Structures are given as structure tokens and as C-alpha cells.
Amino acid sequence: MRKPRRLAPDALQPYVWELPERLRGRWGDRTKADATEGEPESPAAKIDWPTLYGNDHPVEIEVGFGKGLFLVNEGVANPDRNYFGIEIIRKYQLYAATRVANRGLPNVKTCCADAKIIMREFVVPGTVTTVHVFFPDPWWKNKHKKRLLFTPEFATLTNDVLKRNGQLHFVTDVQDYFEMVTETLRHCPGFEELPQPPEPAPVHDMDYLTNFERKFRKEGRPIYRSRYVKVERI
Ligand SMILES: C[S@@+](CC[C@H](N)C(=O)[O-])C[C@H]1O[C@@H](n2cnc3c(N)ncnc32)[C@H](O)[C@@H]1O
């Protein structure tokens, strides 16, 4: 895939949501600090979606968007929905934000930080219609396990930010990860599994969910997909 033409910070700014200055680096991208450490010194101001997007359309979050194919395709296809992407690596955020800016998609914003922190500290509970998690890093090595995204804590955070009847959409190529997530969600009150729609057949090279999906499907690897709906916690 061709690298998008570099844009000036001013041109990217409408497609970027920045952490407040005092928290950048500490809670932000992994190039600067361990993003999972640190507790808030004072409560952060929550994101007001209608102010951010200038409308009250439903908001979907994508966690770990990588090069941003999903955000771009969905942003173009659904101008009446807002997309908020969270990516921990700055160079990917800038790459995806550039693609979004080149298409002029006001309904897509990107942010560079640990998704757990953003969901816990900055998202108003019960305001998001869908959370998408596609091909999260498996972090095979034990010493990297603390970076694993989909923990019971993440499941609870996801449940908290979703509206009632909101959905979680999870896709991976790693069977063990899929089974671990299925087990985690089975024990997380407030989620019910939904039937999985048939796997779509891509008609061209951009017609995939994400870059990783394209790579793995072309390699003929199995892909594991699940959807959950938020229900009343008992
Ligand atoms: C294997 S890549 C998949 C990228 C994209 N979803 C795809 O399918 O093409 C996983 C992505 O999640 C990002 N990531 C990992 N942990 C994260 C976290 N705690 N918060 C936000 N992004 C994270 C990584 O930087 C990486 O870009």
C-alpha cells in the first residue's frame, strides 16, 4: 500500500483528539512512556461527543486501529455515524489521521493513547453504540503479558462505555486469544453473544475490515469473529 502524502499538523488537527497536555507521554503513546502506568492526579474532563463532532450521531470506538482501513472505509460509508479510533503508537495514529484527512471525513477522529485509559477516564459511561477490537496483539511472551489488551478489566470498561443494546465486535486470527476472550465475556455480567453474520467476500483490495484481515485472509488463515450485545447486569 502506498504511504499517504505527509500533511501539515494544521491539516491533521480536525482529525486528531489530543490528551490534555499535562497527561501526554505519561498516559499517551508507547514511544514516550509505559502507557498503562500512573493514576490520575485529578479527574480528567470527559469527552463530550456532540461538541467533538458537532452533531449527536451515534459514536463507535475502534481500539488499536493500526493503519486505519476500518476507520476510513466506515467513515466514508456511514456519514451519519461518528468514529473514534484509539491507537497507542503515534506513527500509526498519524498515518491513519492522514488517510482520514485526505478524504476529509469530519466523522472520524483519532487519538494516541492506551485505550484502557481513554475508556476509563475520558469516555462518558453509556454513550457508545459499538466498540470494535480487531486483531489485538497476542503478546505471546510472558514478560509482555501486562500489555495484553483484552483482560477482564477491559471487558468491564467496554461494558461501561456502551449504551444499553450497544455492541462489542471482536475479531482475531489467534484461536487461543479468541477462546480466552469468549471465556472472559462468559464471566462478565452484562454481555450476551449474538449470532455471527456470514463472512463477507471482499471484491477489491480495500474491501477488507482491516489491514491484518487482508493479510491473513490472503494467506488463507482462519479468522475468529464474535459479536456481543450489552444487556442489563444481573
Ligand atoms: C496487531 S495490530 C492490528 C491493527 C489493526 N486493528 C488491523 O487489524 O489491521 C494491533 C494494534 O493495536 C494497537 N494497540 C495495542 N495495545 C493497545 C492499547 N492498549 N490501546 C490502543 N491501541 C493498542 C497496536 O499499536 C497495534 O496497532
Image: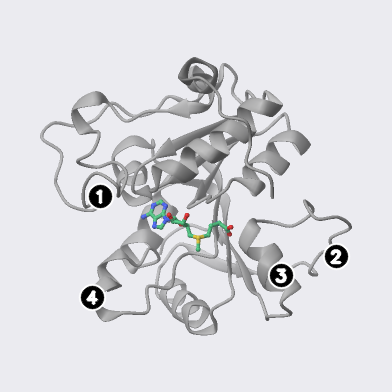
> Which callout, 3 or 4, points to the residue nearer the camera?
4
Q: How crowded is mark 2: few (under 14 residues within 10 Å), some or many (20 or more)?
A: few
At 72% across and 43% down in the image, what residue appears?
73
Does the residue at mark 3 contact the one at mark 4 (Cβ under 8 Å)?
no
Q: Which tag, 1 or 4, sits closer to the chain's start?
A: 1
At 21% across and 33% down in the image, what residue appears?
23
Q: How crowded is mark 3: few (under 14 residues within 10 Å), some or many (20 or more)?
A: few
C-alpha gap between disc 2 and disc 4: 38 Å
Query: What amino acid is found at the position of numbered circle 2 in the picture?
Result: Ala
C-alpha gap between disc 2 and disc 3: 15 Å
Q: How crowded is mark 1: few (under 14 residues within 10 Å), some or many (20 or more)?
A: many
Q: Mark 1 points at which residue?
A: 35
Q: Name the residue under label 2.
A: 201
The disc at residue 196 is 3
C-alpha gap between disc 3 and disc 4: 34 Å
Q: Which tag, 2 or 4, sits closer to the chain's start?
A: 4
Quadrant of the drawing holding the C terminus: bottom left
Q: Which tag, 2 or 1, sits closer to the chain's start?
A: 1
C-alpha gap between disc 1 and disc 4: 16 Å
The disc at residue 188 is none
The disc at residue 143 is 4
Query: What amino acid is found at the position of numbered circle 3 in the picture?
Result: Gln
Query: What amino acid is found at the position of numbered circle 1 in the picture?
Result: Ala
Q: In which quarter of the image is residue 104?
A: top right
Q: In this view, does 214 lie above or below 180?
A: above
Q: Residue 123 appears at what percent x and percent y?
A: 38, 37
Q: Which tag, 3 or 4, sits closer to the chain's start?
A: 4
